[in-house]
Image (cartoon, rainbow, N blue to C red):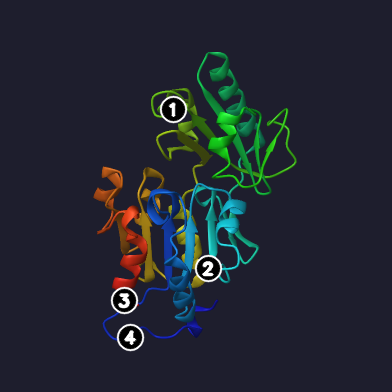
Amino acid sequence: MSTAATPAPLPGRPDIRLVVSDMDGTLLDADGRVPDGLWPLLAELRRRGIVFSPASGRQYATLAHLFAGQDDGMVYMAENGSYVVRDGLEISSDPLDPAVTARLVKTVRQLADEGVDAGVVVCGKHAAYTERGDRAFLDEVAPYYHAHRLVDDATALDDEIVKVAIFDFGPAALGTAPALASFADTHRVVVSSEHWIDVMNHTADKGVAVRRLQDHLGIGPAQTMVFGDYLNDLGMLDAAEWSYAMANAHPDVIDRARHLAPAHTDNGVIRTIRSVLDI
């Protein structure tokens, strides 16, 4: 979609051309569902030439499943920005070195041997791969990884790996995070929720993905609106002048954002877009 062909904003209305929203704790409701009010809003955004982009730690297949049939022109920022796709075509990706992936898998295996109740998800472009197959763990994996496969050895996969995620049944910041400290010198280690930790290349980040997409669309921060609630959203808040923390957001996110939106349980994203853009 060329920004040059999009309608001019009405007088007094900000010239927003890109809206980026985190999913869990931000766009999705208390039950983890896409609010019904989003569908007519997406249609109006398309009519106005405004690109909508879900930005999530979830995989591309999961996001595409959630928005199936409503995603014409939509940009998916999957795997915390390390895999970005529009209309089935890759815009950008940031694959991990296979040796790093193998070292991460072996680290989590060692933690499990030591009694830590955690499991690893190796996130490829085509699917997510797990070695742990018990129902309790897979129930945590399934909502975020629609396409997931149980494998014997997650260090030997025929796929480009863009992220390694670790689920800890205890507090991730206290359990698995210290064991991953050595990776933080060379890679981005993000506590993305109470129980999940994501490891990616240092250059893989939602903020980097937003800036690459801005370049792709030929727009800048003043034309960008973003919404987030957790620490893995901090980077993209810096890439937009219209940056919003949800009322339920982590305190660091609220401090970093320029504006505050109602909580995700109050349809904060939808209400804010409609208010700011007078829809």
Left or right position of 132 against 241 = right
269 or 96, nearer to the observer: 269
Residue 200 lies, in percent from the top left, at: 53, 41
Q: Amino acid at mark 1?
A: Ala
| Mark 2 element type | helix
Assess whether mark 1 and mark 4 are in contact (beta carbons under 8 angstroms): no
Locate the C terminus and report the quarter of the image it occupies: bottom left
Q: Amino acid at mark 2?
A: His
Please identify, in this view, whether the residue under mark 4 or under mark 2 is nearer the observer: 4
Please identify, in this view, whether the residue under mark 2 or under mark 3 is nearer the observer: 3
274 or 237, nearer to the observer: 274
Tell me if mark 3 has few (under 14), some (14-19) or many (20+) residues whose alpha carbon lies within 10 angstroms of its own. Answer: some
Label 2, label 1: how many angstroms apart (C-alpha)? 35 Å
Please identify, in this view, whether the residue under mark 2 or under mark 1 is nearer the observer: 1
Q: Which residue is mark 1?
A: 177
Looking at the rendered structure, which numbered label has been put on residue 216? 2
For marks 2 and 1 on the same chain, the one whose residue lies earlier in the sequence: 1
Residue 66 lies, in percent from the top left, at: 55, 57
